[in-house]
Amino acid sequence: MKQNVIIILASGSPRRKELLEQAGLEFQIITSDVDEKANSDIPQEVVIELSEQKCTSVADEFIRKTLKTDSAELMNMLLIDSGGFLVVGADTIVSMNNKILGKPENSSDAKNCLMSLSGQIHEVYTGVSCKYLTYSEYNKGLIEADRFSFYSKTLVKMYPFNEYEALDYIATGEPNDKAGSYGIQGIGARLVESIEGDYNNVVGFPLAKFMKELELRHYISYD
């Protein structure tokens, strides 16, 4: 596989980092400090909005910085044949009965969330938004030359479990920073009966779909 762009992952998620590494992609991480706020309460719209906000925040900062950078220095930074930067933002949410289940505020919140999932089917949505930035001799800096967004949906069915099982899981500390109060890639896997769709989407990034989008736009190639 040949990578034709420099990828910037606008996320500090260790799970997304591991998935991109698993795919053999080379990338840098620059986290966004944007105050995320969605205008919609429809899950698939929310993940697109929030992923776009993360992506745009990092991309705009890149553009601002390069406008102050000497063009020769910038071209060297781009390694001339890299093609440019692809900034990637992502956001994942858990939803059930059209209600978005966020990260728990405390152990009590995590227990309530987990018990609502017990024996039920819920949805996991991940939105991915990308902006391609390339050097413009006219602007003497980076400009946006392409953008695209998509989302992926996975259905997750949980085994029925009781309060003691939920509390035992909460005691591990794993649910603390997880949407829906569980992590399928960790100890939380013991609660999951089955899934319909992309497993990696539940982890936090629809890797296969992302790779297909990169190939379609010639940001990666296999020849």
Image: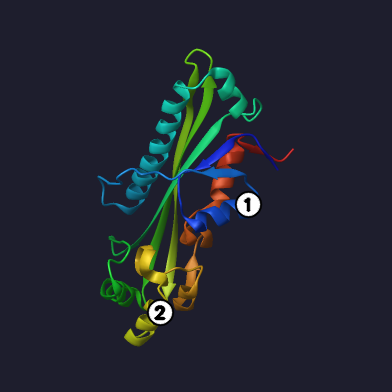
Q: Residue at x 62, y 44 (%)?
A: 26
Q: Amino acid at mark 2?
A: Tyr
Left or right side of 159 for 20: right
Residue 118 image label: none
**Rendered position, 143 above or below 181:** above
**Rendered position, 47 above or below 132:** below
Q: Amino acid at mark 1?
A: Ala
**Rendered position, 58 above or below 71:** below
**Callout 1: helix, strand or loop?**
loop
- Residue 66 picture location, percent across and down: 47, 25
Number of on-image labels: 2
- Residue 63 picture location, percent across and down: 44, 27
Between residues 57 and 69, which one lies in front from this camera angle?
A: 69
Farthest right residue? 223
Label 1, residues with CA under 10 Å away: few <14, some 14-19, many ≥20: few
Residue 183 image-quadrant placement: bottom left
Q: Residue at x 62, y 25 (%)?
A: 76
**Callout 2: helix, strand or loop?**
helix
Q: Which residue is mark 1?
A: 23
Q: Which residue is mark 2?
A: 169
Are discs 1 and 2 less than 8 Å apart at CB? no
Q: Residue at x 42, y 40 (%)?
A: 55
Q: Quadrant of the N terminus?
A: top right
- Residue 115 picture location, percent across and down: 31, 77
Farthest top residue? 138
